[in-house]
Amino acid sequence: MPIILARYSEIGLKSTPVRVKFENRLRDNMISMLAGDRIEALVTKRDARFYVETGDIDAAASAVKRVFGISSLSVAEVCSSEMEDICSTAAEYSLSRLKEGESFAVKARREGDHSYTSVDVGREAGSAIFLANESKGVKVDLTAPDVTFYVEVRNNKAFVFGSYVRCHGGLPLGTQGKVMAEIRSDRDILSAWFMMKRGCKVIVNGERQPLLERYDPDLKYGAEISPDILGVVKGIPLSELGSQPISEYEVPLFFPTAGMADEEVLSFMKMIKEESSRR
């Protein structure tokens, strides 16, 4: 049964107490996102990785991809860290993924105490894949392969997968305080989205925003500046900043998209809308 292997990046730079706090929040956010999409799943964390086990792997991957703080994910087959198991799993995994005459490579990495090296894993798994697909006329190409297989060995488990799916990264939602966002346009929505990516919980001042709710199932609405609000977010382009009236708010103002051209805003919004529509 496949499993989702989710990774973070920026969180790993934090001190141990802060990293643990952020990891816990990230796990809670993943569970909340999956629940918001009505996906039953088990989320666990081991060795700087999150593992999502579910019966609906495609829908779960789509949900996890929208969780800020996750930098990449892979849908992987799992086996033990025994070399024999790794080779048989890699061979089986490759059968439906290598076509006639294609070239391939194996990239392996390893964490933990094992009797073999990462180079050994790559060599042995590559040999098993070659033998399993020999009748197709496949060949090894370590420079520019048609297909790349990845093997990640972590202590007593190994994961075999074919791709890294890039996610949004950033910081876990809710780790950087609260801000209010005035939502009147697409630029306002994108400005709020960028603040969410940097870990801020957004309070929306405006109409309901289904698009932002896809990235925060617990999105809040309101127009009052409470004591815990760190600032107000506005989608103002650079050309209009000088004409802005003196703010009525007694908190800082943030303009995340001030330096972005309208074309960039449209491009980002197109990506967000397409991603949020996937189930």
Image: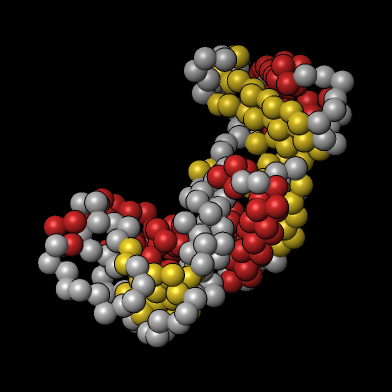
Q: Is residue 85 visible?
A: no
Q: Nearer the viewer, residue 138 or 227?
A: 227
Q: Residue at x 34, y 76 (%)?
A: 250
* Total count of labels: 0
Q: Is residue 171 left or right of residue 57?
A: left
* In the image, residue 210 above or below residue 15: below
Q: Is residue 242 left or right of residue 167?
A: left
Q: Residue at x 32, y 67 (%)?
A: 253
Quadrant of the rendered structure where residue 136 is? top right
Q: Residue at x 72, y 41 (%)?
A: 77
* In the image, residue 233 above or below residue 99: below
Q: Residue 34, percent across and down?
A: 62, 65
Q: Nearer the viewer, residue 54 or 233?
A: 233
Q: Residue at x 56, y 18 (%)?
A: 103
Q: Residue 173, percent across and down?
A: 54, 62
Q: Residue 92, percent across and down?
A: 73, 32
Outermost residue, front side: 250
Q: Is residue 14 visible?
A: yes
